[in-house]
Amino acid sequence: MARSKRELQEINAGSMADIAFLLLIFFLVTTTMDTDTGLVRVLPPFVEEDPLDPPPPVNARNVFVVLANANDNMLVEDEYMVIDDLKDAAKEFIIGSPSNPDDMRFPEFKKVEDPELIQVFGANQLISKQIISLQNDRGTSYDLYIQIQDQLAAAYREVRDEVGMEKFGMTYTQLAASNKESDKDKANAIKKLVPQRISEAEPKDIDQARVAAGRSN
């Protein structure tokens, strides 16, 4: 009598799609996304036509000029500078010299007019007219551009932290992260007192000889 062949049992794959879907949901829920990278910057609104009135003139002493050429060399206030020194130089300019307003190395100051600032800091508080002007060459590397942005942002953050410690015994970072509404109001006041003014022009071909001359000085 011939032996009957055993029939192969098929694997039930009916639930495989459900299992794969559940695994997908599991990985989506448990995977963390790094959202701390990149530049936090609010871009100005688009202007379709040129304004009829020209912008008011800006005193040259109020502008801190940073140039980066195609060779990734940086010129700050017409002097060659390495990236590690940029933060301290920017901080010195942002803080300025309120005790000596005639010092042409630093920006001008004006008395605050904002009622909120007057309430927090007093009517005699001064605010700097500082502006940081960043100009990149079309060939400037993205890495140098990000490093410059990080150094400038760190300079503003440290100045604000120092103001917070001096006025309130807490850094600006701590006040901004606090759950107390009064602390957040103080952080907003510091932000107005030390506004982050970084002006970026359209990239262009920066004179390489100018940067080289600054480097040789």
Image (cartoon, helix red, strand yellow):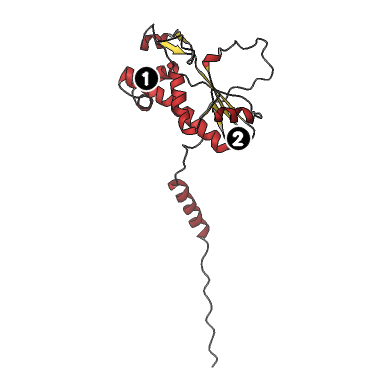
Q: Could you tell me which quadrant the C terminus lies in? A: top right
Q: Compared to 163, does 177 lie above or below? A: below
Q: Earlier in the sequence, mark 2 or mark 1?
A: 2
Q: Residue at x 52, y 81 (%)?
A: 6
Q: CA distance from mark 2 to mark 1?
A: 34 Å
Q: Which mark is residue 140?
A: 2
| Percent position of residue 152, x then y | 48, 27
Q: Is residue 39 visible?
A: no
The amino acid beneath tag 2 is Thr
| Percent position of residue 134, x then y | 56, 25
Q: Residues within 10 Å of mark 1 (few under 14, many from 20)?
A: many
Q: Compared to 123, does 140 lie above or below? A: below
The amino acid beneath tag 1 is Val
Q: Residue at x 51, y 31 (%)?
A: 148
* Disc 1 target residue: 163
| Front in this rendered view, residue 55 or 183 | 55
| Percent position of residue 54, x then y | 65, 11
Q: Compared to 97, does 153 lie above or below? A: below
Mark 1: which secondary structure? helix
Q: Which mark is residue 145?
A: none
Q: Residue at x 43, y 18 (%)?
A: 95
Mark 2: which secondary structure? loop
Residue lying furthest front in this view?
217
Q: Quadrant of residue 32?
A: top left
Eye-nearest disc, 2 or 1: 2
Residue lying furthest right in this view?
49
| Front in this rendered view, residue 195 or 77 | 77
| Percent position of residue 48, x then y | 68, 20
